[in-house]
Image (tube, grey):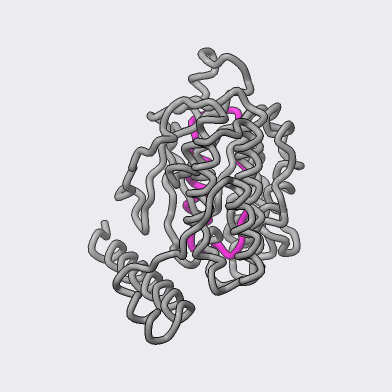
Amino acid sequence: MVSILIPAYNAEKWIADTLRSAIAQTWEPKEIIVVDDGSTDGTLAVAKQFESSNLRVVTQENQGAAAARNKAFSLCQGDFIQWMDADDLLAPDKISKQLDELDRLPSRRTLLLSAWGKFLHWHHRAQFVPTSLWRDLSPREFLYHKMMDNVFMQTATWLVSRELTEAAGPWDTRLLGDDDGEYFCRVLLASDGTRFVPEARVYYRSHAAASLSYVGHSPTKIEAHWLSMQLHIKYLRSLEDSERTRSACLKYLQRGLIHFYAERPDLLRQVEKLAKDLDGELQVPRLSWKYAWIQTLFGWRSAVRTQDWLRTLRWSVQTFFDRVVFFR
């Protein structure tokens, strides 16, 4: 049996499509568990409309996505776990395509992954862009390329055996954004590696600044992001501590520096100390030429906030265009 586990918070606009996508999975038997994390909109009411013998909806006080995922897992009975966010979609045969690989897997400790494409409004317009993670990899090589190449696998792409899920431990409730990135690092550490199934597909809805993964200027999110980065580096170095892995960790730190630079001098010192431990040093993050003049006239924070505002505006325009022009 496969357990499809869905944390939901203020997802009234999308939860119905997500649940239809889960119900439509051709693999049987399956169970679907939705944990409403104290939503303040109509998420719970919409989800309740789908309740059945194999779709259960529970609610809890708002504690964050990681806590909701832990609650869902505590209630499930499946031999395999399909994690899913409340706004994403699965192709109907996603799980079936992955489990067709079972007879060819060396053990239940092999992770099953799928292709994923990002979309704004219409999932049929999703763009599937392969990365260096779209292949079979050992845990060490997966983490190395993830950090070196600045790529990731979306949450719903993973299909994990119960044995591996229990070995990895619970989701870390301290992490507010990159909880999935850190969690699947631990799953990888407990695994034999990944098996990529290109025929299986996930549709990832893009939300720009509204996304949980968006760090922004929240002190708590910045601190949580720094914790996640430290754990990522620790996990990779536990598998291989070499010149090439330290180089990957330095690139990873350099990309993340923009979240701490000027916003949190205390964390910046910690970042620089870790870079030194990796036998390197970091450069002052650079903004594109479009924002450099704002930095010169008004300072770094104004430039970064302008960049964030324009990114959100651009996403809103693109979403409107996608919804209206490509309406069908």
Quarter-of-image position of residue 40: bottom right
Give the quarter of the image for residue 296.
bottom left
- Furthest residue toward bottom: 297
Q: Nearer the viewer, residue 271 or 178?
A: 271
309 over 54 or under it: above or below: below
Horizontal placement of 244 versus 77: left or right?
left
x 30%, y 50%: residue: 125
Work out whether residue 165 can be spotted: yes
**Residue stretch rendered in magenta on the structure:** 1-29
Q: Nearer the viewer, residue 209 or 281?
A: 281
Q: Which residue sits furthest left? A: 325
Q: Residue 322's image quarter?
A: bottom left
Give me the residue at 52% from left, 48% from top: 250
Q: Can residue 97 be seen by looking at this rendering?
A: no
Magenta stretch encompasses residue 26: yes
| Residue 44 x, y percent position in the rendering | 63, 61
In the rendered view, tell whether residue 288 sits above or below residue 142. below
